Amino acid sequence: MSEKLKTIKELADELGVTKQNILYHIKSLPNKERQKNDKGINVLTLKEQELLEKRIQKKLIAHR
């Protein structure tokens, strides 16, 4: 697999937001089925990460 999958916590830590914030924005993703890693933890594809990052950055800028 060439794609870098990240857990919700990894993405939250990278963006400096809470896991709850990521979970809130996940609802906006078109694909409701989450992939899981070998430990059974939900992971996000690169495309999902990009969509979430854009959405969260937009919200952060709007609140400044």
Image (cartoon, grey):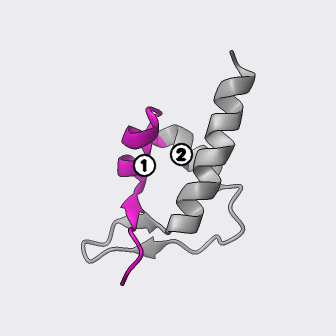
In this view, 63 is above or below 2: above
Q: Residue at x 70, y 19 (%)?
A: 63
With 19 as the anchor, is 64 left or right in this view? right
In this view, 8 is above or below 43: above
Residue 14 falls inside the magenta stretch: yes
Which of label 1 and label 2 is nearer to you? 1
x and y, in percent, of residue 9 in the image: 37, 48
Q: Which residue is mark 1?
A: 11
The residue range painted magenta reads 1-19
Report, in whole angstroms, how far the alpha carbon at label 1 lies from the one at label 2.
8 Å
Q: Residue at x 43, y 32 (%)?
A: 16
x and y, in percent, of residue 1 in the image: 36, 84
In this view, 47 is above or below 50: below
- Residue in the foreground of this view, choosing between 53 and 18: 53
Q: Of marks 1 and 2, which one's residue comes earlier in the chain? A: 1
Q: Amino acid at mark 1?
A: Leu
**In the image, farthest residue toward the bottom:** 1
Secondary structure at numbered mark 1: helix
With 26 as the anchor, is 43 left or right in this view? left
Dots 1, 2 in contact, CB < 8 A: yes
Marker disc for residue 22 = 2
With 44 as the anchor, is 38 left or right in this view? left
Secondary structure at numbered mark 2: helix
Tell me the quarter of the picture where residue 4 sits: bottom left
Is residue 26 in view from this perspective?
no
x and y, in percent, of residue 10 in the image: 35, 50
Q: Amino acid at mark 2?
A: Ile
- Residue in the foreground of this view, choosing between 15 and 21: 15
Marker disc for residue 59 = none
